[in-house]
Amino acid sequence: MMPVVNCPTCHAKVEWTEANKYRPFCSERCKQIDLGAWAEEKYTIPAADPLEDPLQDPLADHEPKPH
């Protein structure tokens, strides 16, 4: 029995096989809709700490200890 997943775009049942070149999507259309959503920034990956400046050097304020 082949594993079946839901298409992330339209939620149609899709067999997870090498024969399905669009997997996990059911079609080229659903694949392109998803790509467009990423391009329009409808999906985001949250930052660990949005207040933290990624360009700030974490060691810039650190004073070296004398040996």
Image (spheres, grey):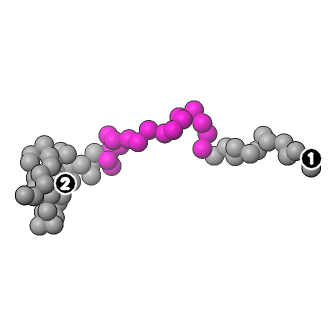
Q: Where is residue 48 in the image (x, y as percent from the top left)?
A: 51, 38
Decide: is 15 above or below 65. Answer: below
User: Which amino acid type corresponds to the residue marked 1 in the rendered image?
Assistant: Pro
Q: Position of residue 21 (x, y in %)?
A: 16, 64
Mark 2 is on which residue type?
Pro
Could you say where residue 51 lies in the image, as x and y percent from the top left?
Answer: 57, 32
Q: Earlier in the sequence, mark 1 or mark 2?
A: 2
Helix, strand or loop at disc 1?
A: loop
Q: Is residue 51 magenta?
A: yes
Quarter of the image containing the N terminus?
bottom left
Residue 27 visible to an observer of this rendering: no
Q: Residue furthest bottom?
A: 19
Residue in the image at 32% along x and 40% along y: 42
Q: Distance between the residues labelled 1 and 2?
A: 57 Å
Q: Mark 2 points at which residue?
A: 24
Rendered residue at 84%/42% (across/down): 63
For the record, the magenta segment spans 38-54
Where residue 3 sits, quadrant-wise, is bottom left
Q: Mark 1 points at which residue?
A: 66
Q: In this view, does 41 lie above or below 26?
A: above
Q: Which residue is drawn at 11% across and 67% down?
A: 19
Q: What residue occupies the far top of the structure in this picture?
A: 51
